[in-house]
Image (cartoon, rainbow, N blue to C red):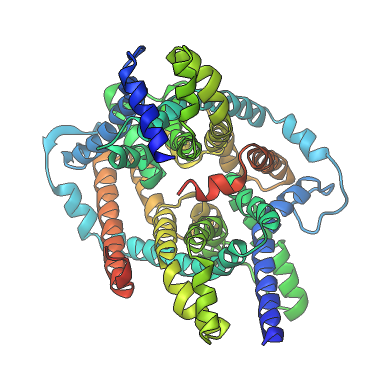
Amino acid sequence: MDARMTRRGTWLAILVTAVYVFLIAPMAIVVLAALNAGDYLAFPPQGLSLRWFIRAAHTEPFVRSFLFSLKLAAWVTVASTLLGTAAALYVVRHSARFRNLLRLAILAPLQLPAILTGIALLIFFLATGIGTRGMRALFIGHTLVSLPYVFLTVSAVLAGFDRSLEEAARSLGAGPFTTFRRVTLPLIKGGVISGALFAFITSFDQFPVSLLLVSVGNTTLPIQLFDYLRFSFDPAAAAVSTVSVLMSVAIVLIVDRLVGLQAVSWGAQ
Amino acid sequence: MASTEGILRAGVRVAPRRGLPPWLLIAPTLLLLTVFFVVPYVNMVRMSLLVKPAIGAYEPEFTLANYARALLDPFHWRVMYRTFSLAGVTTALTLVVAYPVAYHLTYAPRRRQRWLLMLLISPLLVSLVVRGFAWMILLGRVGLVNLTVQRLTGHELVLIGTPAAIVIGLVHVYVPFMALAIAGALQNIPPELIQAARSLGASPWAAFRRVVWPLSLPGVQAGTLLVFVLAVSSYVIPILLGASNVLVMPMLIVQTLLDAFNWPLGSALSMVFFGLTAGVVAVYLRLLARGMPWTRA
């Protein structure tokens, strides 16, 4: 019986390892392809070098869209962190009758296909004359789909929050703002920062919403990379992609340190 | 605990309230959602009912012609069928691949769980374009898959441009979503329940089939729903891995809007697509509810 159980465990472990390889291998291959010294994208790579990173860093559209994406993601992070944290505070603490409805409304941009949201926004912006020039349209579209992540992570930490600490501060004479700054914020900091990081990466990597809202001269990095891939297929694209891979690894490590991935993986549902 | 909290809260309520009303916390978010989410969607519904003139975007005159065009063209139905079947196959495969991962993750020691979650979540945060590109490298003519197959069998296996490549890419994207949804349900199964089944003489397999699997069905439902809805509306992966050979609905809608510049027809197609997706989901939920009567509260 025991032998059969360990055998079953071994089979499960082998199967699961294969799935993790399937998940991770493509990312590893992008990084290896970027380090390729040869002239073509081929696997296995012909020698290692950083020449394609240098090439990518000298390709003007990549640099411009990278900087644009960073700036956009920074603004989106600020807006969605402020709005999402406030919304989570309200929904968890002050709403009773409409709690589920509000939760549903705030998460709706994640439930509806992002590409349809992009289309609806594009038509709306063009029909109202707001237009899609500059960063405005992208900023609004990205904030819609990034805010729910902040809402989810902050709600998750607020759910396990001991309110008697705040009440102690209030009864000792602290005003609502002091209480928030000195008691509440330090306690929910992990959730807020995790949410901000998820919001940042959601905006930085955003594709479906951006596809419809980019305008000439205001292109994000994923869209630029996408356009590039339709006509050329070389290791410079892999070098650009490596940025995205490294960023996601960094964010996973930071969130794990701050609140633990368990909290965001299961608490979020 | 509850009573102390009650006393404390009662004490606070007596204290004079200072500061701003709490609804100010939610107001900006609700404003954003109303103006830039609800209104644009409602506007899209309106747009789908407007007349498309020969010149210009639309005329403020109502018609059902766009819906007639969207529904009566057999070409649209072929694209629709392709989109839904690709998403269906993707969902089924994702479930098969993700279930063991979720099971393994749930019963792993806590320390290892942390590492496994990192492996599961980091690909989730990588840009879709990058993930599509990675599979272009792997599945292309000079890719690892083709080179290996050629060396072993002498035949070519170039998957890029086929529905198979799209399904592989989509399964890769959605496995973490599905695994996390199922693991969420598995977490809630009390271990005593499994122990009880085992001590009453059930084999490990029987305990799984009769206890764990039925109780994990809510997670399976949540995961399959999420993956199906995401897969149906995916755009990047089909366009990159299908090499523009395989047309799916989101591509058709974007083409109608941006290339053909036909907003009314594009909106009508979106609505039809939306309605069909909702219909498929409703049928699926009904069938599933019949399969797990114990979830009906």
Q: Looking at the image, which residue sits at the far right?
A: A47
Q: Position of residue B89 (x, y in %)?
A: 45, 69
Q: Position of residue B265 (x, y in %)?
A: 25, 45
The foreground one among B227 and B43 is B227
Q: Evaluate whether residue B258 shows in this view.
A: no
Q: Looking at the image, which residue sits at the far left?
A: B62
Q: Answer with left or right where residue A223 lies relative to residue A6.
A: left
Q: Answer with left or right where residue A181 lies relative to residue A67.
A: left
* Rendered-image quadrant of the N terminus of chain A: bottom right
Q: Position of residue B297 (x, y in %)?
A: 27, 63
Q: Position of residue A155 (x, y in %)?
A: 45, 37
Q: Answer with left or right where residue B177 lies relative to residue B83.
A: right
Specify the quadrant of the image occupied by residue A116: top left
Residue drawn at x 63%, y 57% as measured from the top left: B135
Residue drawn at x 73%, y 54% as measured from the top left: A29
Residue drawn at x 39%, y 65% as measured from the top left: B82
The foreground one among B127 and A93 is A93
Q: Answer with left or right where residue B198 lies relative to residue B16.
A: right
Q: Evaluate whether residue B98 shows in this view.
A: yes
The foreground one among B291 and A230 is B291
Q: Is residue A2 above or below residue A62?
A: below
- Total marks shown come to 0
